[in-house]
Amino acid sequence: MLLIPTIIKEIETVLSQVKENQLQNIAGQLQKAKRIFVNGEGRSGLMAKSFAMRLMHLGATVYVVGETITPSIEEGDLLVAISGSGTTKNVVWTAEKTNSLGCSVVAVTTNPESALAQAATTVLHVPAATKYRRENELKTIQPLGSLFDQCAHLVFDTLCLLYSALTQVDHDAAFGRHSNLE
Amino acid sequence: MLLIPTIIKEIETVLSQVKENQLQNIAGQLQKAKRIFVNGEGRSGLMAKSFAMRLMHLGATVYVVGETITPSIEEGDLLVAISGSGTTKNVVWTAEKTNSLGCSVVAVTTNPESALAQAATTVLHVPAATKYRRENELKTIQPLGSLFDQCAHLVFDTLCLLYSALTQVDHDAAFGRHSNLE
Amino acid sequence: MLLIPTIIKEIETVLSQVKENQLQNIAGQLQKAKRIFVNGEGRSGLMAKSFAMRLMHLGATVYVVGETITPSIEEGDLLVAISGSGTTKNVVWTAEKTNSLGCSVVAVTTNPESALAQAATTVLHVPAATKYRRENELKTIQPLGSLFDQCAHLVFDTLCLLYSALTQVDHDAAFGRHSNLE
Amino acid sequence: MLLIPTIIKEIETVLSQVKENQLQNIAGQLQKAKRIFVNGEGRSGLMAKSFAMRLMHLGATVYVVGETITPSIEEGDLLVAISGSGTTKNVVWTAEKTNSLGCSVVAVTTNPESALAQAATTVLHVPAATKYRRENELKTIQPLGSLFDQCAHLVFDTLCLLYSALTQVDHDAAFGRHSNLE
């Protein structure tokens, strides 16, 4: 069995269940937000950082929860919170706190009934296998939450495309914001 | 045009040019290395971190260059260095230094003639578009190096699958090493 | 008023209340631990990272909670958890979880009655002002928890000195472990 | 010998050679800068992050080189670059690049003749021992660059005090910007 085509097929199966019009709606929320905060732990947290970096290139004001210069979150800000299981303690708690401040919370999770989903104003359901291998999860040849991380990566990058269409930021403008100190 | 299928098609086009037997060879090098170091900047650096985290779950001794507890690199260690363009200064210099110590360097890059590739003992060529949009690069609808980052992510995860087959680490063992403090 | 001497005087006042024989005891715990984990958020978390980095130079096996390659914590490991107020949610929860696994927890805090202190097996009380400016706190000319961070830094570095005396790691051995990729 | 008083005495000796009117001048530069970038590696890099975090609390627009959402540096921005030896490759190169863009560079180093100092527009000389233990360095009982890191921490916090006096940010305003998601 070739592995790469198998992995791509797994991703396709999951993402065929994500609706692009929901992504369009979320891109609109990102555009309207005063500032965007992202939060996640582990590998899906790295995907959230990757998302934040590209949003910065595309002109958004965006912060990663837990990084050095991240300020307090305020009215008008939006949080994108990711957890495959929807139970990562720090991510759930942060979403609840943000929600309680009246801010929008977009939850990216495999479990629309999880604590994270319940703290969200919008649930972006990505039905991939998680490290818990619950019974109703899709089968995968990959360890832990790899399939979820891959799908989250592509969903975030699709949001970036939709966002850049809304804000009309082209490649050159994005290139100009890319770090020039590396 | 639906975006997700377009992105997946772009990824497929790039990865159809990556040979799984080369990945098998690299997985063998990872298994034989005393310790594995990874290095990258920006979004592809986040993919390298994601790779390192999963290798840790799979039982490898692995470090991220620049993180807090990363020790000096020594004989017998292996460096995986990633840069789309192959020109990121810090990544190139680190690869050159590692090579000069007699360690193996696996370079992941779009450019097999780049300075990074020249400092490597193995070049893993991922022929995706970079933020420089050189003439011979594949076309992409995505900004900057997004396509490269996506392909690197899947190549790294394929390496993880091959590595876990070699070391016979199963899902439960990997789950047991996953952080229990989040 | 000269600021630097005033800051140093503030630090001296706080640290005169920290007993070196308690630090000696903690250094002994660090030496006996199978592995050391550190955890903290914000500026005091950066001091914990600084501590972890030096302990690595001195030969300890040490991890920072939340960094890429940090594995699960297990019996025989020790956690150093820092929070000025002793109430930082993530730090408290991590300490409680670690304690419940039967591991030692050294809490560094201004408040020996805090939730963090209660989750600890050893409380290292550093009686500096915190960002909450409680009534009984020492006066400081500095904003937020700066004085606590400074005192934590020096307490951690004193622990490093005591640890290196116990393990007999000299300057040259430490220098050899310092990253050679920067 | 008691260690804490010895460490404090070492710090006092170094900092007695730092002029507060130079710090006042640098605080003025920080206030005038459009945005502040900080850069450093290892433990002194953690002190730079700590500085950046407090400057954010005090109302500055500040970024850490290498973190996720750090944009490109532009005219009118100022870089604070720290390296004990003044030779850390990545820090020197970043300072040179910044200088070439016409931006101010404040170098914090023990060596006013180092490559870093030469790339700077202002050199803040902190004459502590470094990990290289050059002949003319002050004696220290501490390993590697610990004394430099400690002195850098206090110098940065003194700059914060001077900066807050210039911008008239009080404790409550700073508290309001402190992360409310931890």
Image (tube, coloured by chain):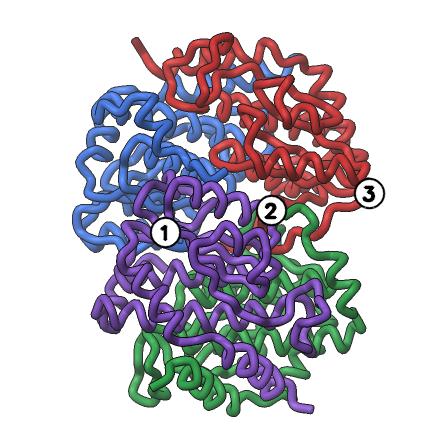
Chain colours: A red, B blue, C purple, D green
User: Label 2 to label 1, Cα distance in Å?
Assistant: 19 Å
The reply, left or right, for residue B96 in relation to residue D152 is left
Quadrant into which the N terminus of chain D falls: bottom left
Kindly indicate the quadrant of the structure image that contains residue C73: top left
Q: Residues within 10 Å of mark 2 (few under 14, many from 20)?
A: some
Q: Quadrant of residue B179?
A: top left
Q: Nearer the viewer, residue D167 or D109?
A: D167
D131 in relation to B130, above or below: below
Q: Which of the two residues, C151 or B21, is positioned nearer the viewer here?
A: C151
Q: Callout 1: 10 Å neighbours few (<14), some, many (20+)?
A: many
Label placed on residue C89: 2
Name the residue rendered at 73%, 61% in the picture. Answer: D175
Q: Which residue is mark 1?
A: C78
Instruction: Tell me which amino acid carries mark 2.
Output: Lys
Looking at the picture, which amino acid does disc 3 mark?
Glu
Residue at mark 1: chain = C
Disc 1 residue type (three-letter): Leu
Q: Tag 2, which secondary structure?
A: helix
